[in-house]
Image (spheres, rainbow, N blue to C red):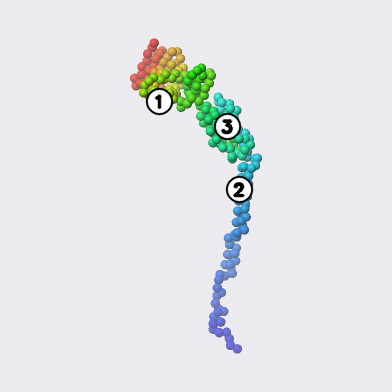
């Protein structure tokens, strides 16, 4: 009987094609996850997102229930709450803080600045900064309060204690026409803010004729010719030195601080 041919014997001795069994087992062990885990993960993320949306908008756990007010002085907390008109029992995330700020500044001009924030889980916080009257303008028996920016923000029936009166008597100079009443008022208030503290406390009124003609009347019949608000710091230092050197003087002129003058009546 004839034996296997040379070709058959050679075929039996060759190495099988493809990777060895050990490599195949290792590849099965470390193969990437299939589609099913990815689908489960996507469903979980969707459910978590839907739960978060429901928690923020649909549940009763995160709703605006209280309004906290801080910083009010002349204004009462109830006045601030009423003007803010915060929509209570609505989702905290849906409360329009910018709209609340706009309402407060529009309805209460005394408020210079307000910070509206969410204090989770149930409180809207309002921190207000009120305008401070630096001077007042008297008209028709009423007093209009003016802040450091020259803004008339409130009308009161009684003159605030320690706040000087602005007596607006503009002349027909070009500067008066250029700046107008509002500009002259701002310049006068700038002078008030530059005064030494003791002088500021003693100032009863400021007479404003033009941009560079502002005169102060103090207690005891004393007067100060200040000029404009320019070089205010230098003028304040010069005035302090003059008052210390001549405490009995009635009139001080610091409109030109390099050449001040003092006189007695």
Q: Which residue is mark 1?
A: 179
Q: Which residue is mark 3?
A: 84
Q: Nearer the viewer, mark 3 or mark 2?
A: 3
- Classify mark 1: helix, strand or loop: helix
Q: Is residue 20 left or right of residue 139?
A: right
* Image quarter hosting the C terminus: top left
CA neighbours of label 2 inside 10 A, class few (<14), some (14 to 19), many (20+): few
34 is higher (above) or lower (below) than 223:
below
Q: Nearer the viewer, mark 3 or mark 1?
A: 1
Q: Position of residue 155 (x, y in %)?
A: 52, 22
* Image quarter hosting the N terminus: bottom right
Q: Nearer the viewer, residue 246 or 251?
A: 251
Name the residue at the left extreme.
259
Q: Is residue 85 visible?
A: yes
Q: Nearer the viewer, mark 1 or mark 2?
A: 1
Q: Are marks 1 and 2 in contact (CB under 8 Å)?
A: no
Q: Is residue 35 left or right of residue 144?
A: right
Point out the tag, 3 or 2, that comes first from the N-terminus.
2
Q: Nearer the viewer, residue 137 or 68?
A: 137
Q: Which residue is mark 2?
A: 49
Q: Is residue 234 visible?
A: no
């Amino acid at each position: 009987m004839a034996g296997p041919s040379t070709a058959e014997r050679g075929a039996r001795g060759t190495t099988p094609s493809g990777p060895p069994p050990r490599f195949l087992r290792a590849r099965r062990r470390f193969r990437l996850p299939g589609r099913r885990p990815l689908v489960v993960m996507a469903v979980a993320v969707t459910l978590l997102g839907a739960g978060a949306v429901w928690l923020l908008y649909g549940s009763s756990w995160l709703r605006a229930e209280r309004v906290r007010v801080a910083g009010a002085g002349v204004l009462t907390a109830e006045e601030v709450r009423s003007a803010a008109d915060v929509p209570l029992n609505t989702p905290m995330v849906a409360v329009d803080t910018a709209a609340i700020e706009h309402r407060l500044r529009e309805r209460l001009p005394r408020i210079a600045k307000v910070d509206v924030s969410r204090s989770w889980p149930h409180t809207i916080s309002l921190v207000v900064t009120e305008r401070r009257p630096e001077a007042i303008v008297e008209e028709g028996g009423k007093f209009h309060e003016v802040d450091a920016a020259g803004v008339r923000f409130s009308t009161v029936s009684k003159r605030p204690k320690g706040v000087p009166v602005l007596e607006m008597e503009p002349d027909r100079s070009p500067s008066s026409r250029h700046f107008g009443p509002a500009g002259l008022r701002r310049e006068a208030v700038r002078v008030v803010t530059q005064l030494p503290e003791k002088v500021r406390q003693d100032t009863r009124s400021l007479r404003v004729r033009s941009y560079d003609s502002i005169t102060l009347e103090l207690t005891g019949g004393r007067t100060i010719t200040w000029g404009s608000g320019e070089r205010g710091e230098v003028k304040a230092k010069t005035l302090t030195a003059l008052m210390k050197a001549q405490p009995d003087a009635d009139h001080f002129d610091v409109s030109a601080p390099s050449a001040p003058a003092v006189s007695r009546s």
